Image (tube, rainbow, N blue to C red):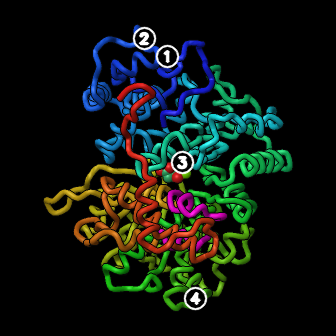
Amino acid sequence: MTKPTDTNRSGHAGLDTLLDPLTNKGTAFSEEERDALDLWGLLPPHVETLDAQLERAKAMIAEVDKPIEKYLRLRDLQDDNEVLFYSLAADDLPGTLPLIYTPTVGEGCVEFSRHYQHPRGLFLTIPEQDKIPEILAHPRFDDIEVIVVSDGERILGLGDQGANGMGIPIGKLSLYTACGGIDPAKTLPILLDTGTDNKDRRENPTYVGWRHERVRGDDYDAFLDAFVDAVKGRWDHVLLQFEDFAQANALRLLNRYRDKLCTFNDDVQGTAAITAGLLMAVAKSAGQKLGEQTFVIFGAGSAGCGIGRMLVSLMVDEGMDEAEAYAKFYAIDSSGLLMDDGDLKDFQKPFARSADDLKDWDMSAEEASLLDVVKNAEATVLIGTSGQSGSFTEDVIKAMAQHTDRPIVMPLSNPTANSEAAPQDVLDWTDGKALVATGSPFDPVCWDGKEYTVDQANNAYIFPGVGLGAIAARAAKVTDAMFVAAARKLAEIEDTNTDGPGHFIPPREKLREVAQAIAEAVARQAVSDGVAQVDFADDGELSKRIEERMWKPHYEPSQGGE
Ligand SMILES: O=C([O-])CC(=O)C(=O)O
Ligand SMILES: [Mg+2]
């Protein structure tokens, strides 16, 4: 954490210490440290404690109103002094998360170029492909443990943002530290700039990315291969998380690399695990099995089908036949209900229905709207991964409530403005019967004179713990069973209740405890899957090693001072 910089940017050692957010303590440098580090004159004279700095930082964030303004101030703080930034995040995790992460990070990406100032992470571009190994070789990156990488093509539900997508790896890694306790010095955000097909971005004079249409096909694949090879060659062990790649690449790249290194795709696997974990907790609280539900997935892309696949494997664990489990699903993509005679991607095929399944319906598959599917299928669970704001209409939700006492409604699309429905509406339309969990944060809802917070079924509940567990075990790869273990653990943690919209997963305040508990389950699973590359004498040692490696924001004595 207090590793001196080796870049000597200014030729003035004291200034270099202050310019590096990993070493800078600002006004908290003691007089002894100011002596030892050649800081006199570079700082105002008053020495502050971390607590006093924190109070000032909180006031600075509070004095601006708009979330994006708060986000920009927080990002500045992060680029100035990481200990102070993470102290602020720890001070109020539920309040800080929607600013440094979903939903505000979405606006942060849209606005990224206009506000670009400080270096953070790495931009690797197609024209400079040959330089990747050399760029990664810098000694500053020797201790990296977690990389989050995006090519910016599917940023939340906001589509292609090109190089502006860098906001996502930065935001995800902030959560790795704030929730998963990964030392910020060991995290590295990477944006693979392969161009952008977003003309507005490309032609905008402020755009900081490569002004080129997206490179696709063999050249794209060669670039990705060169990147992954360089990562493998650079570190003995590192976790590589893929984030916000377009559907055409997400699952394809996951399958290409998943056996080659410790890697996962958060949108496919993390989203599946949080959704499955929450649904397991719902089923448990109702004394039911998952297999008793009928699921409609609205948005049958890689994330939606990833959710379905994980639910199927849990139903199979419950003793159900696999084909019978797939038959519990009706999946809809932008072309409509998935049918076995349609033009489907491989990952969609197991969810396809046959004409025979629809023989009692009053309309053909092509004609069937979401409302028709929900009615005819008698859906009990409705999952939204479509990115289509407001697509769970009053009719759709009311239709669910007609055939089930407690419809389960999960509008998971992000950011908040892309949510398929607002939780308050869902409760109002169903006379308070619906159980609701969203992907993005929403204000509390009111029902029957009482206020309730809404569970946020966001992958923030999963990836920090999976990553921490995978690193602690030095997992050679991330198995599906490790995600299942994460989902099962999540379903166990919180005392559930079905009041109002229902409450099945821990509140955001507890995300750090959640990550720790999930990390233990994941590391244990890595051991039993034979992919762990370290030994733990017993379960107690595994827990202890995970707890010990969780970084907390604090100033370490710098050379020569306290
Ligand atoms: O970032 C989030 O809030 C969840 C996520 O991965 C996405 O929507 O792509
Ligand atoms: Mg994502």
Q: Secondary structure at mark 3?
A: loop
Mark 3 residue CB less than 8 A from any atom of ligand 1: yes
Q: Is residue 32 above or below residue 316?
A: above
Determine the main secondary structure of the stretch shown in magenta: helix
- Front residue of 460 and 399: 460
Which amino acid is tagged 1?
A: Gly
Q: Which residue is mark 1?
A: 14
Q: Upstream in the sequence, badge 4 or badge 1?
A: 1
- Highlighted magenta segment, given as a residue range: 467-486
Q: Residue furthest right?
A: 218
Q: Give me the C-alpha separation between circle 4 and circle 3.
A: 32 Å
Closer to viewer: mark 4 or mark 1: 1
Q: How far across and how far down the image is residue 259, in percent? A: 72, 65
Which amino acid is tagged 3?
A: Leu
At 74% from the left edge and 61% from the top edge, which residue is drawn?
260
Q: Which residue is mark 3?
A: 156
529 relative to 131 in the view: left or right = left
Which amino acid is tagged 4?
A: Glu
Q: Quadrant of the C terminus?
A: top left
Q: Is residue 169 above or below residue 457?
A: above
Q: Secondary structure at mark 2?
A: loop
Q: Upstream in the sequence, badge 4 or badge 3?
A: 3
Q: Which residue is mark 4?
A: 324
Q: Upstream in the sequence, badge 2 or badge 3?
A: 2
Q: Which residue is mark 2?
A: 42
| Residue contact between numbered discs 2 and 1, judged by CB atoms under 8 Å | yes
Q: How far across and how far down the image is residue 318, in percent? A: 49, 88
